[in-house]
Image: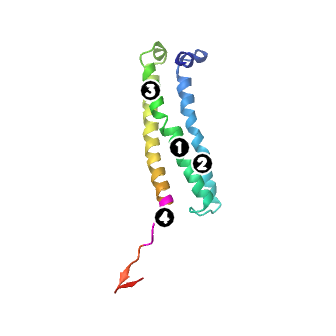
């Protein structure tokens, strides 16, 4: 299978990896929908906004984070092949460096998304803290 990907249309292996990266855009509609909800004035605690947030966190995790081991496994598997040498040294460096930078940003964004999702989902389940002043509940 990898041989087919590497020699696709005589362009080497980079189209395979570019298309692999393109799959990450499956999480973009949820990000755009979040913006629409904000512009339309939906409160952040509304059911459509909560459902979109959970869907955004889930799809972001599945299409950007879960694929990292597969992506880097495939990248590692082609590093010794002849197809890699059809790409210039600058191209190889740009490919590897940009992949690493994108994934660092994806991990940072996933951390923020997960924290926000966790915060919103658990905010409704917290019992209200009661404060006591002179043994009376305020």
Using the rendered view, name the quadrant where residue 90 is placed: top left
Quarter that holds the C terminus: bottom left
123 inside magenta stretch: yes
How many angstroms separate mark 3 from mark 4 (CA)?
41 Å
Residue contact between numbered discs 1 and 4, judged by CB atoms under 8 Å: no
The answer to whether residue 79 is above or below residue 116 is: above
Could you tell me what secondary structure mostly forms the magenta stretch? loop
Q: In the structure shown, which secondary structural element does the residue marked by tag 4 occupy?
A: loop
Which residue is more in the foreground, 41 or 64? 64
The mark lying in front, picked from 2 and 4, is: 4
Q: Residue at x 46, y 37 (%)?
A: 102
Q: Residue at x 47, y 42 (%)?
A: 106
Using the rendered view, name the quadrant where residue 18 is placed: top right
Q: In the structure shown, which secondary structural element does the residue marked by tag 1 occupy?
A: helix
Q: In the structure shown, which secondary structural element does the residue marked by tag 3 occupy?
A: helix
Residue 91 point in image, percent of width and height: 47, 23
Disc assigned to residue 123 = none
Residue found at the very far left of the displayed protein: 134
Disc assigned to residue 73 = 3
The boundaries of the magenta stretch are 121-128
Res 94 seen here:
no
The answer to whether residue 24 is above or below residue 113 is: above
43 inside magenta stretch: no
């Amino acid at each position: 299978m990898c041989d087919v990907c590497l020699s696709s249309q005589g362009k080497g292996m980079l189209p395979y990896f570019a298309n692999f990266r393109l799959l990450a855009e499956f999480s973009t509609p949820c990000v755009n929908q979040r913006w629409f909800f904000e512009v339309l004035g939906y409160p952040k605690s509304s059911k459509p906004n909560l459902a979109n947030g959970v869907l955004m966190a889930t799809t972001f995790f599945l299409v950007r984070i879960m694929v990292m081991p597969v992506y880097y496994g495939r990248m590692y598997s082609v590093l010794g092949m002849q197809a890699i040498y059809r790409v210039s040294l600058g191209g190889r460096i740009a490919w590897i460096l940009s992949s690493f930078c994108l994934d660092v940003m994806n991990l940072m964004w996933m951390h923020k998304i997960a924290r926000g999702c966790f915060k919103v989902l658990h905010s409704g389940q917290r019992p209200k803290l009661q404060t006591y002043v002179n043994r009376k509940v305020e």
